[in-house]
């Protein structure tokens, strides 16, 4: 019953996280696009009122006229929408999922004892400290003299992200490392909203309400953090979907793959921002494509050196029964799986042969199974399954 309830919490939590994430990222992308497409106001009266830019658009059968003030309107409107709860609810739902799946299920999803033999308590506490510490280090860098030099700051952040990716992959399972890398970036993004962007906007609103010119520094800091959030977005989105692609996080150099794909994502975002500004140079997109292409080539599966004619199911059967049927059985022995995942049972030779393609894909090509390498399958055993499958997955 416990596993059943956890599954429902997982489903509902993921659904909520996707909905709120779409709302946050959608509004963020829209305002970046809007800001970069504003044109000087056509009416002199608008310019006299302090309008710095405007944009006409059409959507859903209606015309829209967006205006941005250079500072603030002379009289603040009674209703002023704040874009913040989209960010807060995305982070809260994401942390709920992180706690439910990777902390509550640390033995399955977070810890890989072939990487580091950690206790669940140590793994979880360390993860919390890393997430919190990531924000404090980032915030200190932005507030330091280095924060005034965007190129130097970007270089330092890239270096620290590389160290973070490597450290997490040396500490946790590949899947756990990837999701915690994204959690650090996601926490930085929402903390930027909560601690810098929204307070800066509040100061601006309060100054406008008093009829005083606002202090420009909070706005400058908020703009810097907003730009960072824009470039963090695509790497975080990759991490959110990465648990479906074990070929990336289970690789020997998973940390390097994570950094390469994250850089590619950031460069793709750079391209679109440049395009919004009317300067769509091909260089960022080209470098991103080359990085992704290099990763694809590097991850291409390699065939086993074992002879494909000599492997029978008699040799494969003990591997399957030892490494797979703790979960994939009519009566799983692992407490976290009351029934066989995806209904795949591997108790008999016929079931093993019928599932040969799936077994090969999940254990050899994708390296997704056993999940978290719970049963500690060896590389030689993976190669044995590969040779058996390529030899025709014979039952006799």
Image: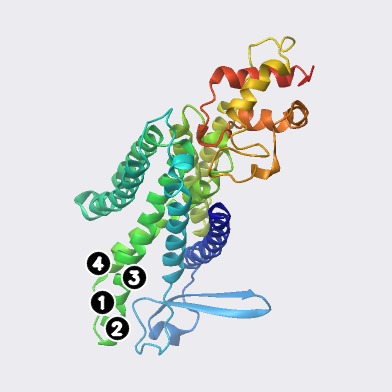
Q: CA distance from mark 1 to mark 2?
A: 7 Å
Quadrant showing the C terminus: top right
Horizontal side of 98 relative to 155 (left or right) equals: right
Given contact means CB atoms under 8 Å apart, are the residues at marks 4 and 1 in contact?
no
**Where residue 71 sits in the image (x, y, percent)?**
33, 77
**Where residue 20 sits in the image (x, y, percent)?**
51, 65
Q: Nearer the viewer, mark 3 or mark 1?
A: 3
Given contact means CB atoms under 8 Å apart, are the residues at marks 1 and 2 in contact?
yes
Is 379 rendered above or below residue 23?
A: above
Give the residue at x 26% y 49%: 137
Residue that carries the numbered disc 2 in the rendered image: 208
| Mark 4 Cα-neighbour bin, 10 Å: few <14, some 14–19, many ≥20 | few
Seen from the viewer's position, the closer of residues 384 and 250 is 384
Horizontal side of 37 relative to 330 (left or right) equals: left
Q: CA distance from mark 2 to mark 4?
A: 15 Å
Q: Nearer the viewer, mark 3 or mark 4?
A: 3
Q: CA distance from mark 3 to mark 1?
A: 14 Å
Residue that carries the numbered disc 4 in the rendered image: 217
Residue that carries the numbered disc 3 in the rendered image: 198
């Amino acid at each position: 019953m416990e596993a059943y309830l956890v599954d429902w919490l997982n489903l509902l939590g993921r659904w909520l996280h996707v909905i709120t994430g779409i709302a946050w990222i959608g509004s963020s992308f829209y305002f970046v696009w809007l800001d970069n497409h504003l044109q000087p106001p056509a009416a002199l009266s608008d310019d006299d009122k302090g309008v710095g830019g405007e944009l006409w658009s059409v959507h859903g059968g209606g015309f829209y006229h967006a205006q941005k003030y250079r500072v603030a309107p002379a009289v603040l409107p009674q209703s002023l929408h704040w874009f913040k709860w989209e960010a807060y609810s995305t982070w809260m739902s994401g942390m709920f999922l992180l706690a439910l799946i990777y902390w509550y299920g640390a033995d399955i999803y977070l810890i890989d004892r072939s990487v580091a033999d950690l206790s669940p308590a140590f793994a979880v506490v360390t993860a919390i400290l890393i997430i919190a510490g990531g924000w404090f280090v980032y915030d200190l860098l932005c507030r330091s003299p280095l924060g005034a030099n965007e190129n130097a700051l970007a270089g330092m952040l890239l270096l620290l992200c590389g160290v973070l990716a490597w450290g997490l992959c040396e500490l946790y399972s590949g899947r756990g490392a990837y999701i915690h890398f994204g959690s650090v970036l996601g926490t930085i993004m929402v903390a930027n909203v909560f601690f810098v962007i929204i307070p800066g906007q509040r100061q601006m609103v309060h100054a406008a309400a008093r009829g005083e010119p606002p202090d420009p520094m909070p706005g400058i800091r908020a703009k810097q953090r907003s730009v960072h959030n824009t470039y963090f977005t695509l790497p975080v989105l990759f991490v959110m979907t990465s648990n479906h692609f074990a070929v990336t996080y289970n690789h020997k150099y998973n940390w390097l793959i994570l950094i390469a794909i994250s850089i590619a994502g950031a460069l793709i975002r750079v391209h679109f921002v440049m395009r919004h500004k009317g300067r769509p140079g091909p260089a960022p997109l080209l470098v991103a494509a080359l990085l992704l292409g290099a990763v694809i080539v590097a991850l291409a599966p390699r065939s086993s050196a074992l002879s494909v004619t000599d492997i029978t199911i008699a040799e494969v059967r003990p591997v399957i029964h030892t490494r797979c049927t703790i979960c994939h059985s009519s009566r799983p022995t692992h407490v976290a799986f009351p029934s066989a995942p995806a209904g795949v049972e591997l108790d008999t030779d016929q079931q093993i042969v019928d599932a040969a393609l799936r077994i090969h894909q999940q254990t050899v090509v994708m390296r997704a199974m056993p999940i978290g390498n719970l049963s500690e399958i060896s590389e030689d055993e993976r190669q044995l399954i590969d040779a058996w499958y390529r030899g025709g997955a014979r039952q006799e």
